[in-house]
Image (cartoon, rainbow, N blue to C red):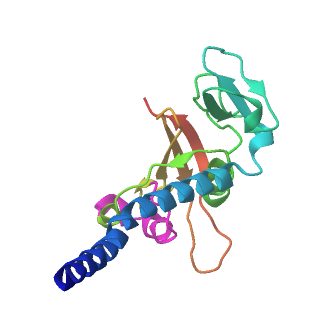
């Protein structure tokens, strides 16, 4: 029967066309998962030797050369800056550094910038003093700047446990090629 063959060929063509559309979404999910795994691998690549690995139920961190040496749930902290609860200590080696140097050290030790919304750059607290210079450099952790006196600026970072670290700088920041930079004057946790 000729009409059965025609219907079968149309159904087959429809299935083939729609099969490609249905199966694209799981493929995209798999690609996204693989990208996440690769990103995590690259984030920890080369840093494993300096990590402390803690097995749940054991309060004493152990050192391991590879993450695969430990089985079970793994909590990763940088042992030089953390205690067993995962909270970072107040870094004391930042005093007197330029903010650029201090920021680089904080980011290298796992501190997370407390980034503000892009509209925060248009507030009054950001339009005075060093505020526009730091904001243009992409330092969106900047909370406020003073346009008078010692030209204080306040920056915020947080650790994995969510505690906020406040960095106060003082001094002028010049953006016209001169080597004049604001320096770290105070470092503390916000209550």
Residue at image coords 55%, 52% = 169
Q: Is residue 184 visible?
A: yes
- Front-most of residues 34 and 175: 34
In the image, residue 130 sits, relative to residue 185, either above or below, namely: below
Number of numbered markers: 0
Q: Which portion, as a residue range, is magenta?
A: 123-141
Residue at image coords 63%, 30% = 74
Residue at image coords 57%, 29% = 87
In the image, residue 114 sits, relative to residue 81, either above or below, namely: below
Residue at image coords 43%, 69% = 132
Q: Residue 29 occupies which quadrant of the picture?
A: bottom left
Percent position of residue 88, x then y: 60, 32
- Front-most of residues 1 and 47: 1
Percent position of residue 77, x then y: 65, 34
Q: Residue 39 occupies which quadrant of the picture?
A: bottom right
Q: Is residue 133 magenta?
A: yes
Quadrant occupied by the C terminus: top left
Left or right of residue 142: residue 45: right
Left or right of residue 147: residue 89: right
In the image, residue 189 sits, relative to residue 57, either above or below, namely: below
Q: Residue 122 occupies which quadrant of the picture?
A: bottom left
Left or right of residue 42: residue 24: left
- Front-most of residues 178 and 113: 113
- Front-most of residues 162 and 1: 1
Quadrant occupied by the N terminus: bottom left
Percent position of residue 186, x then y: 57, 42
In the image, residue 123 sits, relative to residue 82, either above or below, namely: below
Q: Is residue 28 magenta?
A: no
Name the residue at the front extreme. 1
Percent position of residue 91, x then y: 65, 38
Left or right of residue 175: residue 156: left
């Amino acid at each position: 029967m000729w009409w059965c063959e025609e219907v079968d060929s149309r159904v087959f063509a429809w299935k083939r066309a729609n099969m490609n559309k249905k199966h694209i979404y799981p493929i995209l999910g798999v690609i996204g998962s693989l990208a996440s795994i690769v990103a995590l691998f690259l984030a920890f690549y080369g840093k494993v030797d300096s990590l402390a690995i803690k097995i749940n139920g054991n309060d004493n961190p152990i050192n391991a050369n590879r993450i695969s040496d430990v089985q079970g749930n793994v909590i990763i902290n940088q042992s030089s800056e953390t205690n067993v609860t995962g909270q970072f200590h107040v870094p004391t080696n930042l005093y007197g550094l330029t903010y650029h140097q201090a920021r680089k050290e904080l980011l290298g030790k796992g501190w997370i910038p407390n980034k503000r919304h892009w509209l925060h750059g248009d507030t009054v607290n950001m339009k005075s003093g060093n505020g526009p210079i730091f904001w243009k450099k992409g330092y969106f952790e900047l909370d406020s700047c003073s346009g008078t006196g010692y030209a204080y600026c306040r920056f915020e970072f947080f650790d994995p446990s969510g505690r906020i670290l406040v960095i106060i700088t003082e001094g002028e920041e010049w953006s016209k090629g001169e080597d004049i930079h604001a320096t770290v004057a105070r470092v503390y946790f916000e209550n």
